[in-house]
Amino acid sequence: MVLVAAWYIGAKARHGGARNIPFESGIVPVGDAEDMRLSIEFYLIAVFFVIFDLETIFVIAWAVAFHDLGWRGYTGASIFIALLLAVLFYEWRTGALDWGLKRRVRGPARYARAAEGT
């Protein structure tokens, strides 16, 4: 009730002018955001960052409790770090960490070349 009364009594904000323009780092936006297509690599890098950021939290917690955990904790943390290094190596070998330009081959041309070779 109080919120409804405060909204009704309060000053109404005027919309218009610079208020309706999105602010993006001080640069006036050009075009429509719906037309912009982001590459999947941006999402992959974000997911990799989250995974390895969480890994850092676990390693820091392990380092704080190192003396209390003993050899059992050392073995578990070593397996955890080895697994993460294996995942990082796999990502590197598959090219998931490459940010360079990629040459794209369109679908029909790729299939046409494959049919010519057989």
Image: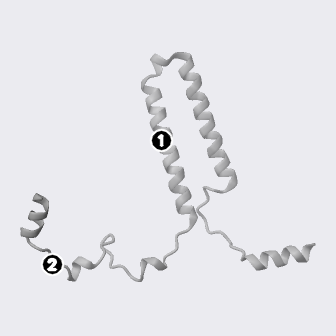
Q: Tell me which residue sits at (63%, 36%) in the image.
A: 83
Task: In the rendered view, tell whether residue 11 sits above or below residue 45.
Answer: below
> Which part of the image, by quadrant, shows the C terminus?
bottom right
Residue kind at label 2, given as amino acid type: Arg
> Does residue 88 show up?
yes
Q: Tell me which residue sits at (49%, 18%) in the image.
A: 69
Circle 2 residues within 10 Å: few <14, some 14–19, many ≥20: few
Task: In the rendered view, tell whether residue 78 sits above or below residue 44.
Answer: above
> Does residue 10 show up?
no
Quadrant position of residue 85 = top right
Task: In the rendered view, tell whether residue 5 sits above or below residue 65.
Answer: below
Q: CA distance from mark 1 to mark 2?
A: 44 Å
Q: Tell me which residue sits at (60%, 55%) in the image.
A: 97
**Image disc number at residue 100:** none
Image coordinates of residue 107 in percent, x first then y, are: 74, 76
Circle 1 residues within 10 Å: few <14, some 14–19, many ≥20: few
The answer to whether residue 13 is left or right of residue 26 is: left
Quadrant position of residue 25 = bottom left
Q: Tell me which residue sits at (72%, 77%) in the image.
A: 106
Would you name the residue on which mark 2 appears? 14
The answer to whether residue 74 is left or right of residue 116 is: left
In this view, the residue in front, 109 or 6, is: 6
Disc 2 secondary structure class:
loop
Disc 1 secondary structure class:
helix
**Image disc number at residue 54:** 1
Image coordinates of residue 17 in percent, x first then y, are: 21, 83
Residue kind at label 1, given as amino acid type: Leu
